[in-house]
Image (cartoon, helix red, strand yellow):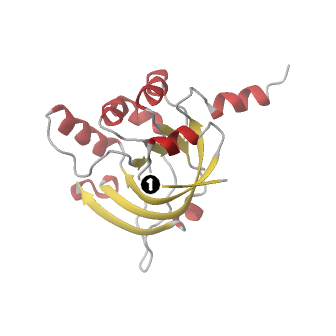
Amino acid sequence: MKHITTPLVDETVADLRAGDQVLITGTLYVARDAAHKRLVALLEEGKPLPFDPRGQVIYYMGPAPAKPGQVSGSAGPTTSGRMDPYTIPLLRAGLKGMIGKGNRSEAVRRALQEYRAVYFAAIGGAGALIARSIVESEVIAYPELGAEALLRLRVVDFPAIVVNDIYGGDAYEDGKRAFRLE
């Protein structure tokens, strides 16, 4: 188990390999489809984003309304592939990590190598457990999107697994090879 802290620096990213289990402490940003579309539009217009993406990690978290007295409701990952059309411009702007579930496109996997960033998976179906690592949650942009607003989370020991690293490693492909019946 590796303990890492955000924002991510190049040395940390270079130390991560597909299959590594990590506990992340620091800030994560939550953005889904609608927020990603707006973020990329801002980049295309040359306008500043609502947060500085350099070194940051975006979590593709499913809608999670908090119950009274809680920081967050269930905080499970959503399917990452839906964000693939928006990922490369964010990597170009300095994003260093993403957390979600499922495979990424070949173009995104190549861009992770080019821009020296990493893709993590969170465990689907474990949203209530993952929520325990969230100690603070704040809407920072697009409140009109409701559950898809852009959030800033402060997390302690957020559990994830490195799926794609800067060396072309792919934990999903490694798993398929390891359990292939011949």
Question: Which amino acid lies under the numbered mark 1 shown in the image of this protein?
Answer: Thr
The residue positioned farthest toward the bottom in the image shown: 69
In the rendered image, residue 167, in percent from the top left (x then y), is placed at 56, 28
Viewer-proximal residue among 16 and 60: 16
The total of numbered circles placed on residues is 1
The residue positioned farthest toward the front in the image shown: 11
In the rendered image, residue 24, in percent from the top left (x then y), is placed at 53, 56
Viewer-proximal residue among 127 and 40: 40
Residue 100 in view (yes/no): no
In the rendered image, residue 109, in percent from the top left (x then y), is placed at 49, 27
Quarter holding residue 64: bottom left
Residue displayed at 56% across by 26% down: 168
Is 155 situated left or right of 88 in this image?
right
Residue pointed to by mark 1: 6
Residue displayed at 22% across by 56% down: 144
Viewer-proximal residue among 96 and 170: 96
- Image quadrant for the C terminus? top right
Residue displayed at 47% across by 38% down: 80
User: Does residue 19 lie above or below 63 as drawn?
Assistant: above
User: Does residue 57 lie above or below 90 as drawn?
Assistant: below
What SS does tag 1 mark?
loop
User: Does residue 163 lie above or below 65 as drawn?
Assistant: above
